[in-house]
Amino acid sequence: MLQHLLFIGFSAIYYSQSTANPQRRPHLFASLALQEAEGSRTVAHIRAAKAAEIPLWLDEQMQRHISDEVRHAQIFTKAVEREGYFIDLDGEAAQQSLSSVGEASMRRYHQVDDLAAAPLPHLLASVLLAEEMGVRGFRCILKALPDHLSTTRAAIESVLKDEERHVRYLADALHYFRATAVVDAYRRDIESKMFKDLGKVVEFMTKPAAERPSLVQPGQKPELSLV
């Protein structure tokens, strides 16, 4: 329980501080844009690799999920632009970010070279945990977002509604596959690993924005596409 509370607490602090800080906010939005873009590709890969095991109702939800994530990536890309920046896709920070989320992260966690080698319920459990974290993060962002960013707020509110729907259908899928214990075990494992790396987490959260690798550059870059 303590680890769970710490995990949620540190996540809330990170999202809230990053949203309220005008120097960190563009970086946060850029990071979310990359996560959402990579999320669309990851769900698409799972859907293709496990097509024979996925019932029709779940396949329809996954198709919608993929489209949602593409839209979310576009929303956060636009949010970065409204801050006066663009995402530096060629930079080292972007490459590091992409390698730490989505399919690359899931392959490391499940210890497979291809997601097709992992059981479908285990993959869905991993996606569910990511969506749960997204829901908590977006709620924190909306609480901390400055009032004058009304366009960004409305867009993120729509993202949150999608993410909440993703959590519901993925939870339904795990019940369908009788695999709810899998997600509970993964949740405890991830929180335990974060607890062990608490020092690194605190160091990351307290590092000044100017000292962090930047995902963004000032100005505009036309026709930027993440997906």
Image (spheres, rainbow, N blue to C red):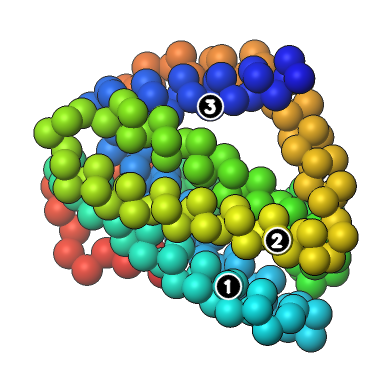
For residue 139, which quarter of the picture? top left
Q: In the visual, does 146 lie left or right of 157?
A: left
Q: Amino acid at mark 1?
A: Gln
**Is tag 2's residue or tag 3's residue first in the polypeptide sequence?**
3
Real-space CA distance between mark 1 and mark 3, rounded to the nearest whole angstrom: 28 Å
User: How would you rate the neighbour count of disc 3 (Cα within 10 Å): few for under 14, some for 14-19, many for 20 or more?
Assistant: some
Real-space CA distance between mark 2 and mark 1, rounded to the nearest whole angstrom: 11 Å
Where the C terminus falls, by quadrant?
A: bottom left
Of marks 1 and 3, the one in the foreground: 1
The reply to whether residue 106 is visible in this rendering is no
For residue 116, which quarter of the picture? bottom right
Of marks 2 and 3, the one in the foreground: 2
Where disc 2 sits, the SS reads helix
Identify the residue under disc 3: 11
Where disc 1 sits, the SS reads helix
Identify the residue under disc 2: 172
Q: Is residue 101 above or below residue 47?
A: above
Q: Is residue 61 above or below residue 147?
A: below
Q: Nearer the viewer, residue 78 or 175?
A: 175
